[in-house]
Amino acid sequence: MIIYQASKSQFLHHALRDDIEDVVSRHYRSATGHGVSPSEMQAWKHSLLEMAKVLCDEEIPDDAGIAIEYQLPQSSKRIDFVIAGEDAAARTKVIIVELKQWSESRRSEKDAIVWARRGGRASEREGPHPSYQAWSYAAYLQDFNAAVQDGAMTLQPCAYLHNHPRDGEIDHPHYRSHLERAPLFLAQERAKLQAFIREHVRRGDRKGALYAIENGRIRPSKLLIDSVAGLLQGKPEFVLIDDQKVAHESILEADARAEEKKQVVIVQGGPGTGKSVIAINLLGTLIARKRNVRYVSKNAAPRAVYESKLAGTFTKTRISNLFSGSGAFVNDEADSYDTLIVDEAHRLNEKSGLYRNLGDNQVKELIRSARCTVFFVDDDQRVTLLDIGHTEVLRRHARELGAEVTELELSSQFRCNGSDGYLAWLDHTLDIRETANQTLDTDEYDFRVFDNPAELHALVELKNRANNRSRVVAGYCWKWPSKKNAQAWDIELPEFDYRRRWNLDKDGSLWIVTKGSVEQVGCIHTCQGLELDYVGVIIGPDLVYRDGHIVTDATKRASSDQSVKGLKAMLKAEPAAARDLADAIVKNTYRTLMTRGMKGCYVYCTDAPLAAYLRSRLRAGPVMAGTDGENTVSPASAGRPSNVVPLRRVTKEEREAGAVAAPVVDLQFAAGAFSEAQALEDGADDWVALPDWVRPQSGLFVAQVIGESMNRRIPNGSWCLFRANPAGTREGKIVVVQHRSISDPETGGRYTVKVYESEKVPTEDGGWRHERITLRPDSDQPGFESIEISVHEGQEGFLVVAEMLMVLAGEPG
């Protein structure tokens, strides 16, 4: 998602004539529904003005593409500034600029880490060097974007610290490799940055590169389970971003100090922050350094999956020496290992063994057994009464055993489509903690509530066909008769003719990767610590909604569920504490299940009021286009540009073979005039080839735009690529719009192509509504006026029919 995009000339107009921070803030609020902090506003004000001064260079083309605040795919991280165009050889170049206001910094001995005052804080803290940050964002983007991977464009990262002198610290030889990959420009070096931009961007490309970045085909996201072999062989499968890099380097430093004093590192992070990615990265790094290291987890599922992925690459003996359960250290001598990496540490138990009668305390045993013990923990993923690995418990035992304690926190989100808002919304909605996220924008993350579990399961099975990365899970509210009788059903909801079995016993901990297992339903024990593309969650009767509140009832769990075993005795001894703990376990269980999906989560609730409550907290995009077949425009009339399509036709056979193509709509949009309504033909006979980097998706079509009101962006007669019925924000985008109550003075029609702008006002329920919508022309000719649509006059009949994505070709000569 790009928050703001424009040509260089448009950006300079906003930066030098308007308050650029206000312009970007409006775009940000429109795109996300949220405001920004005062510190971020100040950063935009100062840094974007500095970039405007840099771009006041006549040799940098006016039509170069500019993007501000581009959110990386499936991440909460944003690139500050992008400049795009073509170099002297007509190769597409994209310059990524990391902006900092720092006036001073201090070198760290850690790789790619620097001390500085960050985020408006008064005190220094460690973080990534700006050059590493810019490079890592570029590398991350390259992993996801097909246009970059396929060589259609080249990314060139750099960093600009416009207040920072060249002092030998930020540019110390310690950072040489990072400075070479992403050049660093400091105060008084504006001319050098201008020369750098001129070298890479000699011509504009009508924002084609920005389109390819935002809308280009996205490669399937990497799953850790598919990359573990490469990581343990030293291959850079994942780029560590920001706080992940800080954590990785801090742990390596603690490991080095452990030769002199016992070390404990506690890394706190919620779902999707990269705890397991760092853990496996560390395992690979320490193996390469010849350290005696093991990966430890209480839950068998992650270990079993990783071990299965290593089969054929490592010997069984080697694998068994790398992975251990948390109960394997009862009898180990002190400091038997250099390093123990404990993933999902919140699941640690007190006792070990099948009957929980061995050892003293798993936390203490792990700390005792290694010079350096690293715990990755999320206090809100405690899901059984036996789980004891809370941060405070880890901290207390570390100090009792004389260890030096380092605490780190991961906050960046790399799951749930990169939506920090989804996790905050989920915590608020499940009444785990209060947050400001009372509603969820479903454009940010594919969250749906189903009334029928059969329909939910069918959709997950459909999603799973692509890459075997989607599964259905459920709260443990149904018994497991199929464990003894293979013909029995476990989860039965007869009113929907829905009958499924729990994950097959023969699949064990490998259920989540076993082909065909999407037919079964998994539970917390077979998915915690692992991730999927899409997850379907069946919420049982242990979580309901009553009298305006989320209510839990752990007694609704199946009697075979061990997670709440002992609750009855605890209720008799300490009823208040037992109720609080049981409440947390139920909520944490569903929080964990509902955060397994990187791209989406689909939910069915056995409790109808709960389903209604979840729906009430969802917010769709601001203006949804209609789906009827009449959202079209008139054909070109005599005297207008030629309607000969200057694009290569694609046959049906080529399309079936995977050619990237879109249908040609035998209609012409009238830019500058609402045209007569006509029916959009669904079954177009003509299809034309699209650039290879365009991501195939439903609703794409090609049509011709007629008129001069948009000629700065769309020359009269151009053939353009559109996406029908677009969801999400339209702010600043070129759209095709219909409104019943307005007629164009020239033609009396009801459709137009214009730049969409809107004014929004907050509502009493914490959301927002449109106050006014403006359809603005962008022409070098006089006489074209904006069209104002006031919501007070009624928004009925207003439709955003399509979004213009890019100009494919001008009118043929």
Image: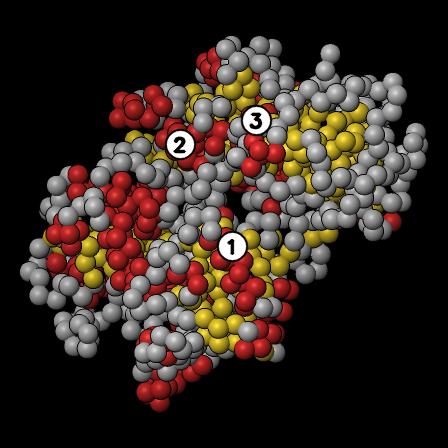
Which amino acid type is shown beneath numbered disc 3? Answer: Pro
The answer to whether residue 595 is visible is: no
**Image position, residue 401 (x, y; %):** 15, 61
Residue at image location 26% in from the left, 58% down from the top: 304
Residue at image location 47% in from the left, 34% down from the top: 145
The crowd level at tag 2 (other Cα within 10 Å; few <14, some 14-19, many 20+) is some
The crowd level at tag 3 (other Cα within 10 Å; few <14, some 14-19, many 20+) is some
Which amino acid type is shown beneath numbered disc 1? Answer: Leu
How far is mark 2 from mark 1, CA to CA? 31 Å
- As helix, strand or loop, the secondary structure at mark 2 comes to helix
**Image position, residue 578 (x, y; %):** 38, 81
Q: Look at the image and tell me in which quarter the C terminus lies.
A: top right
Q: Is residue 637 left or right of residue 52?
A: right
The crowd level at tag 1 (other Cα within 10 Å; few <14, some 14-19, many 20+) is few
**Which residue in the protein does label 2 denote?**
139
Q: Is residue 575 above or below residue 276?
A: below
**Which residue in the protein does label 1 denote?**
462
Which of marks 3 and 2 precedes in the sequence? Answer: 2
In the current view of this chain or complex, which residue is farthest to the bottom? 572
Which amino acid type is shown beneath numbered disc 2? Answer: Ala
The answer to whether residue 91 is visible is: yes
Q: Is residue 301 left or right of residue 293?
A: right
Q: Is residue 500 above or below residue 374?
A: below
Tags 3 and 1 touching, CB below 8 Å? no
Residue depth check, mark 2 versus mark 3: number of the one nearer the observer:
3
**Which residue in the protein does label 3 denote?**
691
Residue at image location 41% in from the left, 35% down from the top: 143
How far is mark 2 from mark 3, CA to CA? 23 Å
Which of marks 1 and 3 precedes in the sequence? Answer: 1
